[in-house]
């Protein structure tokens, strides 16, 4: 989670902020809501080190997509938010599974935005590094591969909390890795195509 060191940075909500940082800001907001229960944009900004305007924008976007809702409050200007309450029949799955689904949905949303808007990025940033592979692994090996990826990314993780550690031309980059077993095709799969 970003430190209070970031709270000193001035952050005006611009189109560039929204396009470059939305996935990470939304994930941070969801993590914070899962941790504390309810939060206002001002409280989120203070805890996460973003501007209250940026937090307010992304809280409203998360609400618009049904991930969070306004929490009951006693009036006034403060507008607290909480994770949306789902009934077991409506949501299905554990809270961890629902959060995983939400994270993947946000990742997919960010990817689609990239595909449609990458020609608006500075020339040096108009390409991406996408790849996939299939490997035959045991569950333990799959965990080890995930650990290797996490360790490879570790040297860059503190740049969110320490803006001065970022190279001048650094930008937020989505790093998405999904390791999952491939399931065999069923006869029903042939009928769906």
Image: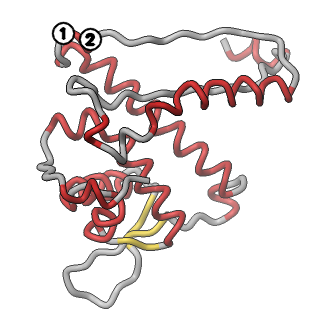
**Is residue 116 depicted above or below 90 in this figure?**
above
Residue nearer the viewer, 168 or 115: 168
Number of callouts: 2
Q: Which residue is mark 1?
A: 123
Indicate the position of residue 64 as horizontal and vertical percent values: 34, 54
Q: Which residue is mark 2?
A: 126
> Which residue does the image show at 15% across and 48% down from the upper left?
13
The colour scheme used to paint the residues is secondary structure
Side of 56 where 186 appears, left or right: right
Indicate the position of residue 57 as horizontal and vertical percent values: 24, 54
Res 56 → quadrant: bottom left
Res 160 → quadrant: top left
> Which residue does the image show at 60% across and 29% down from the upper left?
151
Category of crowding for the residue at label 1, using alpha-carbon neighbours closer than 10 angstroms: few (below 14), some (14–19), many (at least 20) = few
Quadrant for the C terminus, please: top right
**Is residue 163 depicted above or below 111 in this figure?**
below
Side of 92 where 105 appears, left or right: left
Indicate the position of residue 88 as horizontal and vertical percent values: 69, 62
Query: Residue 62 — which label?
Result: none
Side of 113 where 84 appears, left or right: right
Element at badge 1? Answer: helix
Residue nearer the viewer, 55 or 149: 149
Residue nearer the viewer, 71 or 20: 20
**Is residue 35 depicted above or below 146 in this figure?**
below
**Cα separation between marks 2 and 1:** 5 Å
**Marks 2 and 1: CB-CB under 8 Å?**
yes
> Which residue does the image show at 38% across and 24% down from the upper left?
112
> Which residue does the image show at 44% across and 48% down from the upper left?
27
Res 16 → quadrant: top left
Residue nearer the viewer, 138 or 71: 138
Indicate the position of residue 83 as horizontal and vertical percent values: 49, 64
Category of crowding for the residue at label 2, using alpha-carbon neighbours closer than 10 angstroms: few (below 14), some (14–19), many (at least 20) = few
């Amino acid at each position: 989670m970003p430190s209070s060191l970031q709270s000193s940075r001035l952050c005006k909500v611009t189109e560039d902020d929204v396009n470059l940082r939305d996935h990470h800001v939304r994930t941070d907001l969801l993590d914070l809501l899962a941790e504390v229960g309810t939060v206002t944009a001002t409280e989120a900004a203070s805890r996460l080190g973003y501007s209250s305007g940026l937090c307010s924008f992304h809280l409203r976007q998360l609400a618009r997509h049904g991930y969070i809702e306004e929490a009951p409050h006693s009036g006034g200007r403060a507008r607290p938010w909480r994770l949306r309450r789902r009934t077991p029949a409506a949501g299905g799955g554990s809270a961890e599974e629902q959060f995983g689904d939400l994270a993947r949905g946000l990742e997919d949303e960010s990817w689609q935005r990239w595909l449609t808007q990458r020609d608006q990025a500075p020339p040096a940033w108009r390409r991406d590094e996408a790849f996939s592979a299939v490997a035959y692994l045991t569950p333990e090996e799959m965990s080890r591969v995930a650990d290797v990826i996490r360790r490879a990314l570790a040297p860059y993780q503190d740049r969110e909390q320490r803006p001065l550690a970022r190279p001048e031309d650094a930008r937020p980059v989505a790093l998405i890795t999904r390791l999952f077993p491939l399931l065999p095709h069923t006869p029903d799969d042939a009928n769906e195509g």
